[in-house]
Amino acid sequence: MRTVVIADDDELVGQLDVESVDLLLCLGDLWAATLEKAYIKYRPKKVFAVRGNHDPDTPFPAFVTHLHDTVESYGGLTFGGFDGCWRYKPRGLYLYDQLEISELFSTFPRVDVFVAHNSPHGFHERGGDVHQGFDGFRDYIERVQPRYFFHGHQHINQTTRIGETELIGVFGELLIDLRLPKLKDGV
């Protein structure tokens, strides 16, 4: 499934030389105009998005499916997602405590593709304050092994394997072919 993933830097979105993709994933901290620009340029059949810690509390455009704390299916894959990042300041939108996320994700169902703004704790982090990852995300990956876990927030383009999971940090945009899960016994 041909997929464009976008996150965190409006000026870096819309630079890929590709038209008509299957899926657009937005990892947050982008203006609505940037999301619309990517939608027009790449003409995805489906758009999933989560909010970042710098996003406003306004509705997504009608073409977007908001993945926060929910599970959706598309193209033979299941997708889950979560807005925001670690509570690094007393007030603000889409900020969560470590314990809150650990409790929420102790029972979150397995998905093939997880879409988040923040990273798991201990991976792709930039310092221990604003860019600290979530313990609950790390525990979720270890518990259910989603095929992919995408995150923004850390301003890094990096891929790390955790067991069966490809953990992919995106800054700007990335073109990736999401592979469908292999069926057991060759069926």
Image (tube, rainbow, N blue to C red):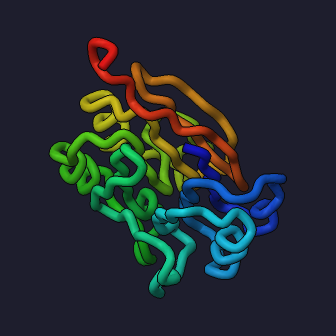
Taking depth in this image into account, of 169 and 128 the one nearest to the observer is: 169
Taking depth in this image into account, of 24 and 135 the one nearest to the observer is: 24
Q: Residue 177: x percent and y percent?
A: 60, 38
Classify 179 as above or below 41.
above
- Residue drawn at (50%, 30%) of the image: 166
- Residue drawn at (56%, 27%) of the image: 160
- Residue drawn at (53%, 45%) of the image: 128
Viewed as shown, does residue 61 lie left or right of 80? right
Q: Residue 100: x percent and y percent?
A: 24, 56
- Residue drawn at (68%, 59%) of the image: 20
Q: Which image quarter: residue 55?
A: bottom right
Classify 152 as above or below 39.
above
Task: Name the quadrant of the N terminus.
Answer: top right
Viewed as shown, does residue 11 lie left or right of 109? right
Q: Residue 56: x percent and y percent?
A: 52, 82
Q: Residue furthest top?
A: 185
Viewed as shown, does residue 17 lie left or right of 116? right
